[in-house]
Image: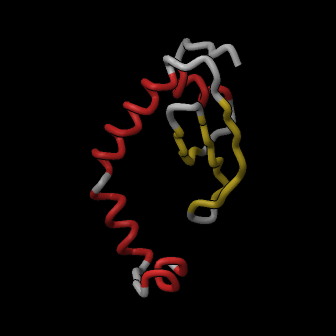
Amino acid sequence: MRLLKEVFGLTISEGTIANAFRRMGPAFDTACTAIKAKFLTVPVIASDETTTRVNSVIQWQWVFQSDEAVLYTILPSRSQTVTAAVLGEHQPKV
């Protein structure tokens, strides 16, 4: 929000941003599905995770990246179920 104000002179509340994300939910889901499909075709995928707080609860920020796609998500788990949800049975070379 600070960046938008300093760079573009825009003042946007957190509620406005949250409402925009909520309205875009179906479009985000469609894009996420397409990105996951890209990962099933690439031989090299990098991933990393780190903690973040969502409503005062510790969750995990995940990023998956290849030369063709990037997927960023926040989930309550750090377990291998996250990578399984993204990659299914696909085993990249690296």
- Say whether residue 37 is left or right of residue 2: left
Q: Quadrant of residue 9?
A: bottom left
- Say whether residue 19 is left or right of residue 76: left
Would you place residue 26 above or below residue 65 in this image? Answer: below
| Residue 27 spot, x, y in % from top left | 29, 46
Q: Quadrant of the C terminus?
A: top right
| Residue 1 spot, x, y in % from top left | 50, 77
- The residue nearer to you, when weighing 71 against 57, is 71
Would you place residue 15 above or below residue 91 in this image? Answer: below
- Say whether residue 59 is left or right of residue 73: right
Would you place residue 37 above or below residue 5 in this image? Answer: above
Please give the name of the residue rendered at 52% of the width and 85% of the height, measured from the top-left corner.
6
Please give the name of the residue rendered at 51% of the width and 31% of the height, measured from the top-left corner.
68
- The residue nearer to you, when weighing 28 against 5, is 5
- The residue nearer to you, when weighing 90 against 46, is 46
Please give the name of the residue rendered at 33% of the width and 66% of the height, measured from the top-left corner.
19
Q: Quadrant of residue 64?
A: top right
The way the protein has been coloured in the rendering is secondary structure
| Residue 44 spot, x, y in % from top left | 64, 22
| Residue 58 spot, x, y in % from top left | 67, 55
